[in-house]
Amino acid sequence: MKQDFWSRKIKAFLHDPPDKALKISGHKGRRDEILNVVGITYDNSVDPADWISSAMQRLNIPSKCDIRIDFEKPDKPVFKHTLSAIEKELQQVESLIAEKGFEKCFLVYVFNPVVIEPLVDSEDWRKTYFTIWRLLPEKYPLGNFTPADTRIPDHSIWDHLDITAAIAGVLDDFGLFAVKIPAVQEFISNARKLSDLWAGSHMLSYLIFEAITSLVYEYGPDAIIFPHLRGHPLLDKWLKEEFSIEIQYDEMLDVANLPNTFLCVIPNSRGKELGTQVKEKILSALKEISNPVKEKLKSGGIMFDEQLWDTQINNAISVFTTCLKVPNVDVYEK
């Protein structure tokens, strides 16, 4: 895929600085400073993706409403949990971040563009995008607490940037793509021992992940709407091996923690093609798992019908895919 695709996604992911809610005035200038460090100049080609993602995530409240929360007026903005309504001062939030072991890389809370410099590979925008998407929230963890919109502070800035980048990649050909391995209970119920139960669950989780990565490589991890992938140990391992990104990932790779389905954003015109690709990827991964077992049986002198074996593997699971075109939406500037 061309470099300009990934540079556009970088612009979309960084179209708002992660500290926007703390200092709304001048945020576009701070965005330009961040992109300048990356080596990219902002243009309005990703603006429609921003407008669409904003419409998807927020209520349309008139700008003159009194309910607007202004983070710039108080010296110490208050963070309110969207479900429990528990309030925390900025210093308390900073303490929570410190407890999790994150490095304090912001001196006055606003984002320091220098932080992003080590994440940039000017010769590979795909690697740069994957690195920024995965590591920037760790470099600036305050973004997990700052809302994307101070009027409706019910989702973080990272949520908004993820969706904007996903839409920017398919802006002119917007499709929702769903993949499911059905009848998982029937598959797992064939277990005779607890270890078999674990193996069946883990196998399904691994097969779904193999299908996911085939799309992630082409369109980015932000394109996967469900499940959320940032920080997932399997993806972190894949990123480290595929792109040599230095990630300290959770070693609990033996936990089956992916569902039997996922939903993502892709070009609608490629729905049928990618459906075939995903099915082939899952079947290939299943054969990769089963072949060593078959070879071990053969080396042990155990006789069996290889043709029957292959037939059973090819029909062991079903894969359903579907793609829905998102209707064209008239986009108006905010």
Image (cartoon, helix red, strand yellow):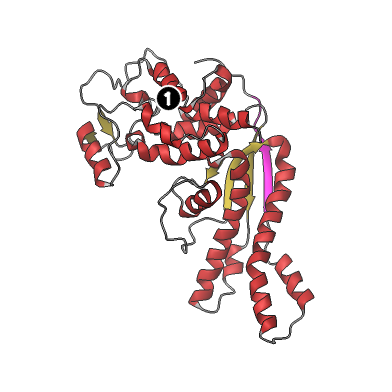
In depth, the one of 319 and 120 nearer the eye is: 120
Residue drawn where x is 65% and y is 61% of the image: 285
Residue 251: percent from the left, percent from the top? 42, 59
Residue drawn where x is 41% and y is 56% of the image: 250
As for residue 325 lying within the magenta part, the answer is yes
Position of 147 relative to 226 (above/below): above
In depth, the one of 269 and 102 nearer the eye is: 102
Farthest front residue in view? 123
Residue 315 in view here: no
Residue linked to disc 1: 34
- The N terminus lies in which quarter of the figure? top right
Residue drawn where x is 42% and y is 24% of the image: 34
For label 1, count other residues whose C-alpha is less than 10 Å away and answer few (under 14), some (14-19) or many (20+): many
Residue 172: percent from the left, percent from the top? 66, 26
Name the kind of residue labelled 1 in the image.
Ile
Q: Is residue 310 left or right of residue 247?
A: right
Residue 203: percent from the left, percent from the top? 57, 64
Decide whether the magenta segment is chiefly helix, strand or loop: strand
Residue 141: percent from the left, percent from the top? 34, 38
Q: Quadrant of residue 143?
A: top left
In depth, the one of 271 and 109 nearer the eye is: 109
Position of 257 relative to 70 (above/below): below
Farthest right residue in view? 307
Q: Which residues are drawn in magenta?
A: 320-328
